[in-house]
Image: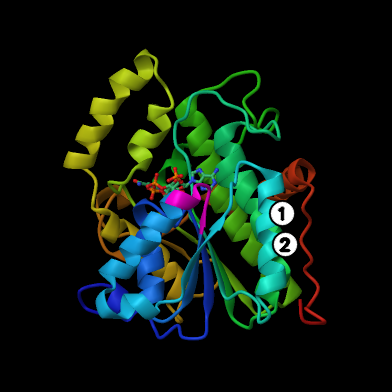
Amino acid sequence: MSNGWTSNDIPDLSGRTAVVTGGNSGIGLIECRELSRHGARVILACRDEQKGDAAMAEIRSQLGAAGADAKIEVRRLDLASLDSIKVFADGLTSDLDEGLDLLVNNAGVMATPRLMTGDDFELQIGTNHFGHFALTGRLFELLKARPGSRVVTVSSIAARAGKLNFDDLNGRNRYGRWQAYAQSKLANLVFALDLQAMISEAGLDMKSMAAHPGVAATNLTTAGNSLDSGLMGLLSKPFLKLNDLLIAQDAEAGALPVLRAATDPGLAGGSYIGCDGPGETRGKPVIVAPRKLALNREIAGWLWQASVEATGVEYDFNPVTSKP
Ligand SMILES: NC(=O)c1ccc[n+]([C@@H]2O[C@H](COP(=O)([O-])OP(=O)(O)OC[C@H]3O[C@@H](n4cnc5c(N)ncnc54)[C@H](OP(=O)(O)O)[C@@H]3O)[C@@H](O)[C@H]2O)c1
């Protein structure tokens, strides 16, 4: 591994089943392709099934001859809707007899204008954190049923600048699009590390990991702003495009920290995988240090409780007693 961990280091994943949220675009699409290339059954969890089908066709074609037999499927999941999350999770629970080996909490929106979900969450904390918190909780029994299962939650270097607004997670009183993004990505990191702490305390044979892709050229940099037809949207688009051209690594490189967190057998639970380059913006996938605040159990406990209250989803940390 002298040149760094690459997707060639992914072990054989035959017999394993993986769910990747937002698997139709950006780093998620590459994660799905590589998990599939190494033998996993891969479920692309997408809010737009047409986009999911197009991504599945692209993955099959990129896999060449092996693509025709690859076990890939698309299922609808809108993380901005607690109802959609329940329908998705109920469907998987009735269909996956053997349980689930890997959940990649990858989907995300960035720097959107102030918008609320149908459940009255601010869109970024609602999609990026509450949605994945609810999804992981609803799939927890399936994950517990498989020895050595993993949950990988995708954070960001933006988490470093994030603050959890204890009084107003949904930004009702004051809203900044970038602050809301950074808060949601900090919540992703706090959640991933806290989940591992709770898994360890309960003695479960599972791992929760965090990862970030550095800065990667994907649809993320334009999707959020494209929701904004105002001056801010117009002004920020060329800046973000320039950012993609000058700073960003490609999506292939951006996917590697997530893939390593998902598959490297040597990693301890609670590892955070990012990039080894300047400011962790690019480079090879390596273990990086989370900011101290993300390891604070008191803060994590507060966020956990707030997330249970917001979503109505509780986790069962007792060992699995019967098949799901
Ligand atoms: N790119 C970067 O530089 C960067 C840096 C740090 C962290 N990240 C993180 O990396 C992850 C992947 O982003 P990306 O860069 O690959 O961006 P992307 O190309 O825009 O992909 C984002 C994915 O999330 C999906 N998504 C958004 N809202 C959703 C919802 N309500 N329900 C289900 N899926 C939803 C999108 O679906 P549609 O295609 O339907 O919109 C898309 O598939 C995100 O969590 C992001 O915060 C990215």
Q: Quadrant of the N terminus?
A: bottom left
Distance from mark 2 CB to nearest ligand 1 atom below 8 Å = no
User: Which of 28/210 is in front?
Assistant: 28
User: Which of 163/216 is in front?
Assistant: 216
**Residue plotted at (47% across, 43% down):** 159
**Residue plotted at (51% across, 44% down):** 185
Looking at the picture, does residue 224 appear above or below residue 54? Answer: above
Q: Which mark is residue 86?
A: 1
Q: Which mark is residue 160?
A: none
Instruction: Name the side, left or right, on which 199 lies relative to 41.
Output: right
* Residue 49 is a magenta residue: yes
Q: Are marks 1 and 2 in contact (CB under 8 Å)?
A: yes
Q: Residue furthest left?
A: 246
Q: Quadrant of residue 222?
A: top left
Q: Quadrant of the C terminus?
A: bottom right
Looking at the picture, does residue 313 appear above or below residue 176? Answer: below
Identify the amino acid type marked 2. Asp
The residue where tag 2 is placed is 90
Secondary-structure class at tag 1? helix
Looking at the picture, does residue 80 appear above or below residue 314? Answer: above
Magenta part of the chain: 45-50
Q: Quadrant of residue 287?
A: bottom left
Looking at the picture, does residue 140 appear above or below residue 88? Answer: below
Q: Does the rendering let one see residue 287? A: no
Secondary-structure class at tag 2? helix
**Residue 274 x, y percent position in the rendering:** 37, 58
Identify the amino acid type marked 1. Lys
